[in-house]
Amino acid sequence: MGEEKGKGTGERIYTIPLRSVKKTPRWKRSTRAISVIRDFLQHHTKSDIVLLDSSINEKVWERGSQKPPSRIRVKVTEEEDVVKAELVE
């Protein structure tokens, strides 16, 4: 009876700041940006399992490992315990 909490499929759009990535060594920046995105989504969705779409990876690595974007917009869908993220166009 009624809806169960945590079982719904919700969609949200997040703007994730990647300014902190600029403090890491130049050759590690895009790798660090991916882990920052994953950590941000784990923190804000309270989920351990976060799946990133390949479009996010392509956007971060678009200008190489030394120049990731300063922010990225991501659409997040929650299905049970799994959080799926894809790039917002």
Image (cartoon, grey):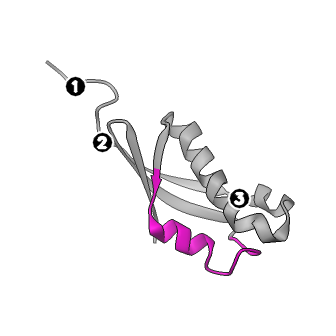
- Residue closer to the observer: 66 or 10: 66
Q: Amino acid at mark 1?
A: Glu
Position of residue 86 measured from the top left corner of the image (x, y, whole percent): 44, 61
For the N terminus, the image quarter is top left
Q: CA distance from mark 1 to mark 3?
A: 38 Å
Instruction: Assess disc 1: are there few (<14), some (14-19) or many (≥20) residues with their C-alpha within 10 Å of its C-alpha.
Output: few
Residue 43 drawn above or below residue 58: above
**Would you name the residue on which mark 3 appears?**
32
Counting residues from the N terminus, which is met first, the one under dot 3 or under dot 2?
2
Position of residue 14 measured from the top left corner of the image (x, y, whole percent): 53, 52
**Depth-wise, is mark 1 or mark 3 nearer the camera?**
3
Q: Secondary structure at mark 2?
A: loop
Residue 27 drawn above or below residue 5: below
Counting residues from the N terminus, which is met first, the one under dot 1 or under dot 2?
1
For residue 83, side relative to residue 63 (left or right) = left
Position of residue 40 measured from the top left corner of the image (x, y, whole percent): 61, 46
Q: Amino acid at mark 2?
A: Thr
Residue 73 drawn above or below residue 7: below
Identified at 60% across, 63% down, the residue is: 72
**Would you name the residue on which mark 1 appears?**
3
| Residue 9: assigned label | 2
Identity of the residue furthest to the bottom in this view: 63
Q: Read off the magenta span.
A: 51-68
The reply to whether callout 1 and callout 2 are in contact (CB within 8 Å) is: no
Q: Secondary structure at mark 3?
A: helix
Residue 66 drawn in magenta: yes
Q: CA distance from mark 1 to mark 2?
A: 12 Å
Q: CA distance from mark 3 to mark 2?
A: 29 Å
Identified at 32% across, 36% down, the residue is: 80
- Residue closer to the observer: 53 or 69: 53
For residue 28, side relative to residue 47 (left or right) = right
